[in-house]
Image (cartoon, rainbow, N blue to C red):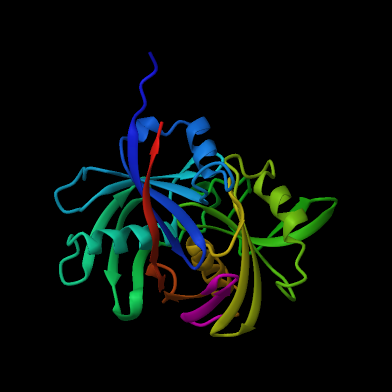
């Protein structure tokens, strides 16, 4: 006789980048189940599933894992980290508004702020192609990529997960739906890549759309915002404090440059709580 297991979840989002947060063993979340639950019409509907496990270190509140809507486990998620931090704060696990979390990409420090904002330290920015990984003979500021029958120029960077960033004249007219999937699955990125389309408004403001690996275009991407600012700053186009306008609203990224940690700030909200039987 088939037995069902009831699993509780909290539905959250950061500027429309939405998540189902589960307190459950990650072993349950094999690819087919995640794909079923992520379906917007027949499941819960989410960009990523965030699975909370008991802490593996005494100085952390939780160890979390991330599964994209297509069932692929990935290394990091900026808006997801902010949502988890907000959830832990609501559970009384953030002392003086601060909490340290553990993830496949390493430790993440977070601070809850006034107005429902959450800041997370996304760690060091890495431009070494091997850190993504990205097939390139040497590290440079810009790379040519043959994609979708043409040639584009990108910056490649890891924010705990891989990103390719290209500058566009306007995010409104950028060919995200054609170029995004082609960049995501380009053979030079053996583990696929998130594709960011960045429009520089001025030195403290960019507009951004991101075609996320395993999820498609989302309303906001936290690591994508960090990646765009890091690449734009490396290209000499941006300062250290940048407002990032995404389709779902506005994020803020602070980065003082190489060797410094990059910080992401934005809102994190609970949509509803529920349960599923699997």
Image x and y of residue 38, in percent: 52, 44
Quadrant location of the N terminus?
top left
Image x and y of residue 181, in percent: 70, 49
Image x and y of residue 125, in percent: 45, 62
Tell me: 66 left or right of 72.
left
Asked whether 149 falls inside the magenta stretch, the response is: no
Q: Nearer the viewer, residue 185 or 93?
A: 93
Please tell me which residue is depicted at 78% across the width and 51% down the height of the picture: 146
Q: Nearer the viewer, residue 278 or 141?
A: 278
- As drawn, the residue found furthest toward the front would be 1
Within the image, what quadrant is residue 112 found in?
A: bottom left
Position of residue 256 relative to residue 110, above or below, is: below
Tell me: 10 left or right of 245.
left
Q: Nearer the viewer, residue 167 or 207?
A: 207
Asked whether 245 falls inside the magenta stretch, the response is: yes
Please tell me which residue is depicted at 66% across the width and 63% down the height of the picture: 142
Quadrant location of the C terminus?
top left
In the rendered image, is residue 162 in sight?
yes
Position of residue 168 relative to residue 196, above or below, is: below
Number of marks drawn: 0
Please tell me which residue is depicted at 52% across the width and 47% down the height of the picture: 130
In the rendered image, is residue 71 in sight?
no
Image x and y of residue 189, in percent: 62, 44
The span picked out in magenta is 238-249
Please tell me which residue is depicted at 74% across the width and 56% down the height of the picture: 177
Tell me: 113 left or right of 175.
left
- As drawn, the residue found furthest toward the top would be 1
């Amino acid at each position: 006789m088939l037995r069902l297991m009831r699993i509780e979840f909290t539905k959250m989002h950061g500027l429309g980048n939405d998540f189902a947060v589960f307190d459950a063993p990650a072993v349950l979340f094999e690819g087919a189940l995640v794909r079923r639950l992520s379906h917007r019409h027949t499941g819960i509907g989410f960009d990523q599933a965030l699975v909370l496990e008991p802490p593996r270190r005494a100085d952390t509140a939780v160890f979390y894992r991330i599964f994209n809507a297509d069932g692929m486990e990935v290394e990091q998620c900026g808006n997801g980290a902010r949502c988890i931090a907000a959830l832990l704060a609501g559970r009384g696990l953030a002392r003086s508004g601060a909490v340290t979390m553990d993830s496949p990409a390493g430790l993440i420090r977070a601070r809850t702020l006034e107005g429902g904002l959450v800041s997370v330290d996304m760690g060091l920015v890495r431009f070494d192609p091997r850190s993504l990984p990205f097939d390139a003979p040497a590290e440079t500021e810009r790379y040519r990529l043959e994609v979708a029958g043409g040639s584009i120029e990108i910056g490649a960077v890891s924010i705990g997960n891989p990103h390719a960033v290209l500058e566009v004249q306007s995010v409104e007219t950028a060919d995200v739906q054609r170029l995004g999937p082609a960049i995501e699955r380009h053979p030079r990125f053996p583990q696929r890549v998130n594709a960011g389309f960045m429009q520089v408004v001025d030195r403290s403001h960019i507009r951004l759309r991101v075609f996320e690996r395993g999820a498609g275009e989302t309303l906001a991407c936290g690591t994508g915002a960090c990646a765009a600012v890091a690449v734009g700053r490396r290209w000499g186009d941006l300062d250290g404090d940048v407002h990032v306008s995404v389709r779902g609203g506005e994020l803020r990224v602070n980065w003082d440059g190489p060797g410094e940690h990059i910080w992401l700030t934005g809102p994190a909200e609970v949509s509803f709580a529920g349960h599923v039987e699997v």
